[in-house]
Amino acid sequence: MNRILYLTIVREYYRQNAIFIFAVLMFAIGFLRGNEHLAIINEALRSPFILSCIFLLWILYALKVTLFALRFLSQRSSEFLYHIRLFSPAKRIWAFMNLQFSLIQLAFTYAVLMIGKGILEKTWWAILAIVVVNLVVVVAGALVYEYRIRRPNSRQDVTRKYANLSFTTPQFLFYPQYLLTRQTVLLLITKSFTAFVIMGVCYLYPTDDYDIRLISLGCLLAAFSQSVILQNLHFFERMYFDMYRNMPVSGLRWFLNYLLTLAVILLPEAVVLARNFPAGPGLADGVLQFVFLFSVTVVLLHYQIFVAGNNESGFQVVFFSGVLLAILVMFRIPAWAFSAAGLLLAYGMLKRRFYEVE
């Protein structure tokens, strides 16, 4: 049973979230040095407030993985997993605990580092709190899966029942509305991370001999952090807009609709960048940095929809493309060149592959 859950849910989670995990690791390793991590851990072990903030991040991440597993269980292709009910409740709970533990390994690894540092510092109350929070996260996730597996056909949409909108929603708002109502945790975690990245590079800019390339790297990381949201847009269209592809709609209209959709999705990044952009560069530099972020996101969307699809090799291309773009940014390739080339490349992919995608 553990093997089945690993092959069906755990492996699929890490496949779909490879870019998100890469972005987290890139930020943790690339932007923070080892001594800075130790300083953060030391402060957290002595400050209940900072430790509570870290616990909140772990809980949000646990919600993310739990909702992913629940969505996976609700798919028609996953109905065979409900045969797990043939096992005893004790074996099911243990298997679900292993499942939850495998999904939260990213946060658990950091918890182990904090526990090791806490033992050296003899902050026993902090160690106890870390252990309790991780146990609660694992056990709570297992109980949620057990509750779901006992009710295979129960679907309750309270939001739709009490908040039925009567006005006509424009097409470019369909997916942002879907994110807000169905993928809330994914949206919240992604936007929190990208806001933190953009704020970080904006605050670092005036503290040393950095130039505008630092903000470009932050915008690049923020763009690649949207990969899971962009992949879900592909799934969303396949689920709800397959018939619409056969309508007489021009490729240019589809492209403009994608641009408007991504503009709405990237509004939080635009606000954070505008409020925290350093005073040294001009207004034109700030606008250009957002256009750079926007264009990279547009290219990623069109590549994932029209080229990569569900091919696992597509994630490797995205990964190495991000590394190559970062190197080119460091070699002072102007952001406007990336932006213009990216928008043209995205439109070319749509025109060439629009009717070939299934």
Image: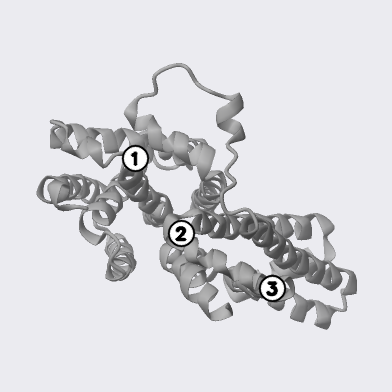
Three-letter amino acid code of the residue under disc 2: Asp
Residue 271 visible, this orientation: yes
Three-letter amino acid code of the residue under disc 3: Leu
In the rendered view, would you say 159 is above or below 61? Answer: above
Residue contact between numbered discs 2 and 1, judged by CB atoms under 8 Å:
no
Q: Quadrant of residue 1?
A: bottom right
Residue 283 is left or right of residue 10, and the answer is left
Residue position for label 1: 240
Secondary structure state at the residue bearing disc 3: helix
Q: Position of residue 28 (x, y in %)?
A: 55, 67
Q: Nearer the viewer, residue 24 or 235?
A: 235
Q: Earlier in the sequence, mark 2 or mark 3?
A: 3
Q: Seen from this angle, which residue lies furthest left?
A: 352
Three-letter amino acid code of the residue under disc 1: Tyr
Residue 233 is left or right of residue 55, and the answer is left
Residue position for label 3: 38
Residue at horizontal 84%, vertical 65%?
Answer: 46
Q: Position of residue 247 (x, y in %)?
A: 17, 32
Residue 123 is left or right of residue 319, and the answer is right
Q: Earlier in the sequence, mark 2 or mark 1?
A: 2
Q: Label 1 crowding class (10 Å Cα cut-off): few <14, some 14-19, many 20+?
A: few
Q: How is the image coloured?
A: one colour
Q: Nearer the viewer, mark 2 or mark 1?
A: 1
Secondary structure state at the residue bearing disc 2: loop
Q: Nearer the viewer, mark 1 or mark 3?
A: 1
Q: Position of residue 89 (x, y in %)?
A: 72, 70
In the rendered view, would you say 36 is above or below 262? Answer: below
Q: Seen from this angle, which residue lies furthest front?
A: 86
Q: Position of residue 330 (x, y in %)?
A: 32, 63
Residue 209: which numbered mark, if any?
A: 2
Q: Nearer the viewer, residue 153 or 251?
A: 153
In the rendered view, would you say 6 is above or below 149? Answer: below
